[in-house]
Image: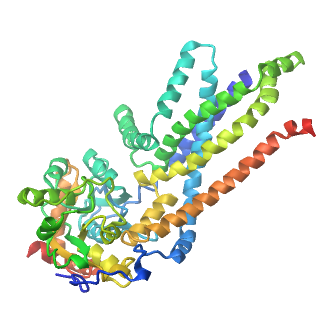
């Protein structure tokens, strides 16, 4: 029995040693900080979280690299700021929100909108990072009844569920507060991204899907879109143009101020508009600053 | 503001027959997906193997503790198994991923937040697998008649030799099918690792769906299902061979 016990203990120690060594060696979450800054002063590396699959705002591309409009903006901000080096960490929506709040990440982007709840948890800078145009996608055969969110709410209000963590949820709640007579049926969903939403609308399970203009254009209108076969049977109308924000940990006031300085400079020199055209095919800032 | 092609009023209400299957589905896409998902199965297999190895070692220790003569040791081991077996894997995964670094930071001041996500996933599944394995090993151990041990000792083997050479090989035969089952479900449960952002086969599948703006999910998940099925088939085959090899002595008697 002693031999067995000794064998067990030594194996456990070996496994512990190996896994500790592996843990030390495998740290791909910690990308190399940007190249040395020109100023030569002390550079603080800050961790910037972003979504893995929110195309084209922030995602991981085929090569496994961080890509997307918001990341391109943050890279430009990083290039302006000598005293900071951004390290990008792709992660889940939940980890991003919890991580920025707890200080694991100094900042993060997820195409986030501002809500009263988020203002309590995060530090918002003065300047948005991008904008998204939200509307509803519905069956083209209902086009005589649905012309906007209000007429949809009067028609049936059967909206594809939205994650309560999403700001879209708060936006619909806000709409319901101002339209108590004909509110939208707002159902909380368990996930951020609902892959089959277009089909649910076509199948009649729901009558509309709270949908970004960009997603509708890329999946349905575009000939390359996976749902292009439904293009004749789906329609989209806008509801609002909404700025999206970089979220900062509450203690990162200096970083947020530096970020604002950089964003104002990048807007003035046209970098932001150029990046927007590159990623969205239009200048989304025209919806925010007009 | 309207994109071209949208908001067309009065589309036909009747659906042509070929369009009755609303879901755009392209089997060729599923097939083409397989080579791009395959490399990420290395992550799935690596996480499974590491968790199975570490989990088995701890499980063996826990099984030994549950057969201990000391009441306190038995109670602790039984408590460990009971708590872990009743924790859903996703709950434990979140507890380990969010709670463990916070606890380590609070206790030691060391920041392990940016350890590779696979480490947290392996810790989670090691804990879960060890609880299952402790029961597998305990029952396997008990399945060998005490007389085997006594006969070996009376034939002149030391107690340790008797355990290693007589009891262990017989216990292994009855443990193998359960171990195989547990390993296969461990591999499949590993798909949950995407929830904390680990890019394994499942995670890569989700990324592909995202890059297609939420489309192609059916094709992607079909490709994943085929690959998981193939991997399970291989594991089943391996365990069958191992079981045959280990039980060769048993077959000999009847021949």
The residue positioned 29% from the left and 71% from the top of the image is A69
Residue in front for this viewpoint, B59 or A160: A160
Residue in front for this viewpoint, A275 or A183: A183
The residue positioned 24% from the left and 53% from the top of the image is A164
Q: Which quarter of the rendered picture does the N terminus of chain B lie within?
A: bottom left
Q: Quadrant of residue B225?
A: bottom right
Q: Which quarter of the rendered picture does the C terminus of chain B lie within?
A: top right
Q: Is residue A69 left or right of residue B26?
A: left
Residue B191 percent coordinates (x, y):
50, 53
Q: Residue furthest right?
A: B255
Residue in front for this viewpoint, A126 or A211: A211
Residue A227 percent coordinates (x, y):
37, 77
Q: Can you see residue A289? A: yes
Q: Is residue B180 left or right of residue A35?
A: right
Residue in front for this viewpoint, A67 or B165: B165
Rendered position, B20 above or below A206: below
Q: Quadrant of residue B59?
A: top right
Residue B52 percent coordinates (x, y):
60, 43
Residue B172 percent coordinates (x, y):
74, 35
């Amino acid at each position: 029995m002693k031999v067995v016990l000794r064998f067990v203990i030594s194996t456990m120690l070996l496994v512990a040693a190996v896994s500790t060594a592996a843990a030390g060696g495998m740290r791909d979450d910690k990308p190399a900080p940007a190249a040395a800054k020109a100023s030569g002063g002390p550079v603080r590396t800050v961790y910037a979280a972003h979504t893995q699959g929110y195309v084209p705002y922030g995602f991981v591309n085929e090569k496994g690299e961080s890509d997307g409009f918001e990341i391109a903006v943050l890279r430009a901000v990083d290039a302006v700021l000598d005293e900071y080096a951004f390290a990008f960490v792709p992660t889940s929506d939940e980890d991003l929100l919890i991580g920025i709040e707890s200080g694991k990440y100094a900042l993060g982007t997820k195409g986030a909108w501002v809500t009263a709840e988020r203002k309590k948890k995060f530090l918002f800078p003065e300047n948005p990072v991008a904008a998204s145009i939200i509307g509803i996608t519905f069956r083209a055969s209902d086009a005589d009844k649905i012309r906007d969110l209000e007429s949809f709410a009067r028609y049936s209000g059967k909206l594809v569920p939205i994650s309560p963590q999403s700001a879209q949820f708060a936006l619909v709640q806000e709409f319901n507060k101002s339209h108590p007579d004909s509110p939208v049926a707002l159902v909380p969903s368990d996930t951020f991204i609902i892959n089959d939403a277009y089909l649910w609308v076509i199948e009649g399970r729901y009558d509309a899907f709270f949908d970004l203009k960009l997603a509708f254009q890329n999946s349905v209108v575009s000939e390359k879109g996976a749902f292009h076969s439904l293009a004749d049977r789906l329609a989209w109308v806008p509801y609002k143009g909404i700025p999206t924000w970089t979220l900062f940990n509450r203690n990162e006031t200096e970083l947020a101020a530096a970020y604002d300085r950089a964003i104002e400079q990048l807007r003035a020199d046209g970098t932001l508009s150029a990046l927007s055209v590159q990623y969205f095919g239009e200048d989304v800032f025209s919806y925010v600053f007009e | 503001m309207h994109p071209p092609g949208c908001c067309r009023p009065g589309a036909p209400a009747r659906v042509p027959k070929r369009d009755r299957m609303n879901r755009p589905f392209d089997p060729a896409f599923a097939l083409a997906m397989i080579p791009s998902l395959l490399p990420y199965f290395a992550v799935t297999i690596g996480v499974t193997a590491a968790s199975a190895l570490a989990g088995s070692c701890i499980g063996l220790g826990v099984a030994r503790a549950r057969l201990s003569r000391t009441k306190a040791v038995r109670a602790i081991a039984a408590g460990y198994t009971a708590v872990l077996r009743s924790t859903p894997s996703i709950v434990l995964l979140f507890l380990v991923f969010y709670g463990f670094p916070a606890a380590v930071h609070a206790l030691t001041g060391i920041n392990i937040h940016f350890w590779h996500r696979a480490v947290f996933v392996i810790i989670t599944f090691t804990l879960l697998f060890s609880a299952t394995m402790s029961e597998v090993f305990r029952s396997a151990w008990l399945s060998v008649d005490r007389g085997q041990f006594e006969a070996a000792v009376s034939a002149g083997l030391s107690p340790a030799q008797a355990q290693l050479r007589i009891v262990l090989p017989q216990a292994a035969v009855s443990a193998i099918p359960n171990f195989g089952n547990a390993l296969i479900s461990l591999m499949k449960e590993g798909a949950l690792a995407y929830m904390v952002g680990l890019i394994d086969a499942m995670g890569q599948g989700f990324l592909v769906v995202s890059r297609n703006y939420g489309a192609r999910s059916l094709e992607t998940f079909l490709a994943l299902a085929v690959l998981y099925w193939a991997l399970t088939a291989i594991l089943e085959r391996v365990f069958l061979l191992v079981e045959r090899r280990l039980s060769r002595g048993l077959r000999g008697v009847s021949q």
